[in-house]
Every structure is written in structure tokens, then in C-alpha cells.
Amino acid sequence: MPNDIHWIRDDATLAHHCSIWRDLPYVALDTEFIRVDTFYPLAGLVQIGDGERAFLIDPLLIGDWKPFAALLESPQVVKVLHACSEDLEVLLRLTGSLPAPLFDTQLAAGYLGIGFSMGYSRLAHAVLGLDLPKDATRSDWLARPLSDIQVRYAADDAKHLAEIYEVLDQRLSDEKRAWLLEDGAELVANLRREVDPRELYREAKLGWKLSRAQLAVLRELYVWREAEARRRDQPRNRIVREHCLWPLARFQPDNLGALAKIEDMHPRTVRQDGETLIQLIKDAAALPREAWPEALPEPLPVDATVLLKRLRAVGQAEAEKLQIVPELMLRKKSLEALLKSGYPDGPYTLPESLRGWRRERMGQALLDALAPGAGEPTP
């Protein structure tokens, strides 16, 4: 085994190294996992880079994650990850904790104008000039023993992630670093924020076309599917495919034959859960009017595209000034929420989702762009 790779396969060794890592300014962190047939990710490996060596933690052999959770939560140690949304789910599932402060190198590349949503290999090439192999990316990380190729791949990820961090961190101004860590904290907060299952139906693409009575059915379908996916530890679409939910609420089949004819309905779902779904639809359809959800708002009309472009231009101008990739400036959902707050004639209100430095630097400019007469050519 190369001398820059160190295995951690028991609780005592993990606790020992965690006590050392908590004295470091940062640790680079990565995970390998499988999430094909399960709701929750299955951790196969956790990697740590300290700037010199790579440590491979075998989660199949660790029972006590408390020291590692303390490391994740230590405010003195920056946790460096890349495109980390799924890694965060793995860590939360394993340890019950999430990393803070969090430095995402994919976001850092955007703040430095290197590129938006860059994959790890592309970033390693752009920053370090390395061409990393991808052979092990999709391999079975729960298999034991892991192959030499898997071990080397995993260790290199952690080692080079630390090197990338040191380069990017030096290039960041104090202001941009603060913004980046603010975004990292937002990622963590979003994952900690428990989504009410009774609100999931609001994300249905065509939900606005349903009546309030039909929305009551749609809501209960989403609630049931979420609960079953978690209980069975299966992907949501394995329980009921997403494209089935809207027509189920719209047409409300009352027998297995009608259920089987619903668009995209899998025969397995009819066999396993058909009777349950029919009863659920019947019960939800019988709810009294006062239990119906409010109607969902219609999407913005085509005419609003002109205003959306005007709002994006505010972000584009600020991005050029700051030399940040424009995609990091203003999220489409925030701009749409802003427009919906007062379309078509105003007044408009900045949405709660526009927070932090973005609100401070661009909030007033966005409102000004929607003011009467804005965008019209001067005589």
C-alpha cells in the first residue's frame, strides 16, 4: 500500500485521528456511496485529505461516529468538499451532523470565474493541470475488498481536493470567501430544513391546473408516497412514478383496471399498492371543502419573459463587475418569486429566498428594473 494512504477501520483509530484533524485549519472530505435501489444513500467509503496524506474510513466497520460528527461541527476547521449536495446526505445519514464551515470547490470555481458547475476532473485539470482517471467512478463501493484501482482513485480524490482548495483559497478575496462560506451554510441549512410532506404537492409541474378538490387528492398521494419511500427505503419513483401523480389526482380511478390505464403507471405498483391507492384517492376525495388546499398560482405568462430578461441583466452586470460566473448570481426561482409578488403592475416585493450578499448588492437594482418606465429607451 502506498505510504500516503492510511486506512481507518475501527472506532478507536477514527477517534484518534479526529482529535488530530480538529487542530488543522481545514480537511478535504469526500464520500463514495451507492444510491440505486434505495431512498437513503449507502456509504461505501469516507475520504479525508489533510494536505499531505489521504485517509480512507471504512464506514462498514465504524460504529461510533461521534468524534467525526464533532469534527464536522468544529467551527475552527474548514470542511472542503466538491459539488457536495449528495455527500451532505451521506454524512447526515452516517453521523447525524453536517459540515460547518463548508467550502465547496465547485462554488469557489464559480466565484473566481473559472467555470460554472464544473465536475471534479475538469476542475482538477483547470487548477492543477491533472488528468484524473475515471475508471472507478461507477464501481461497487460496498464490495470488499475494494480493488487497488478503487483505493487509489478514492485516495487521489481526497489528496487532490486538498491541493485544489489551497490554490483556490489563495485566489479568493476576503469578501468572496465570506460569500462562499455563506453559500455553504445555506446548503447545510436547506438540508436541515425539514420539508413538510403535506407541502410536496406544491412542486407538481401542472398542479395549477387542478381544482382545489383535486389538489386535496394530489397532496395525500405525495404524503403517502414520501412516507412509503422512507419506510421501505426505496426511491420515490419505485413507489409511484412522478408522472402518475397528477393524472391520479385528475382522473381519480376507482378500480384496478382504471388505475392500470393511468399514464406511466407501472404494473408492479398496481399489484403491490393498487387497492391502497384506490382507497387513498377515495378518502382524499371525500375530504370537506375546508380541508382542501388553496389553488396553486398559475405560471408566469409568456409576456413576463421580457421582465425576466431585465432581471437577469442585473445579475449579469454585477457578475461582470465582480468577475463571478453569472449563473451564481440570481436563481431563477427567486426571480420568478419576485415577479409573482406583483405581476403585472406591481408593487413588487423581494422574496425571502433572495438573501445575504445577493439581496444587499442587487435587491434594490432588481426592484428598480421593475419600476414603471424601466427598460424603456430614453428620448
Image (cartoon, rainbow, N blue to C red):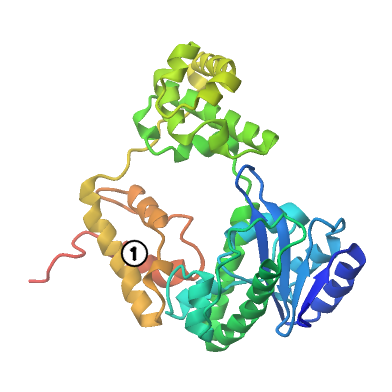
Q: Quadrant of the C terminus?
A: bottom left
Horizontal and vertical percent position of residue 203? 46, 40
> Mark 1: which secondary structure?
helix
Q: Residue at x 69, y 65 (%)?
A: 99
Residue 182 placement, left or right of 143: left
- Measured as percent of width and height from the top left, residue 54 is found at 73, 77
Q: Pick the residue in front: 301 or 121.
A: 121
Label 1 crowd (10 A; few <14 / some 14-19 / many >=20): many
Residue at 26%, 63% (x, y): give it. 310
**Residue 61 in view in this figure:** yes
Location of residue 217 with respect to 43 vertically, above or below: above
Locate the N terminus by quadrant: bottom right
Q: Position of residue 368 (x, y in %)?
A: 29, 65
- The percent coordinates of residue 68 (x first, y second) are 80, 65
Residue drawn at x 29%, y 51% is 346
**Horizontally, is 316 left or right of 69 in the view?**
left
For mark 1, what is the residue?
A: 366
Q: Is 362 situated above or below 287?
A: below
Please state which amino acid type lies under the numbered disc 1: Leu
Q: Is residue 35 left or right of residue 323?
A: right
Q: Is residue 22 visible?
A: no
Q: In this picture, is 355 found above or below 181?
A: above
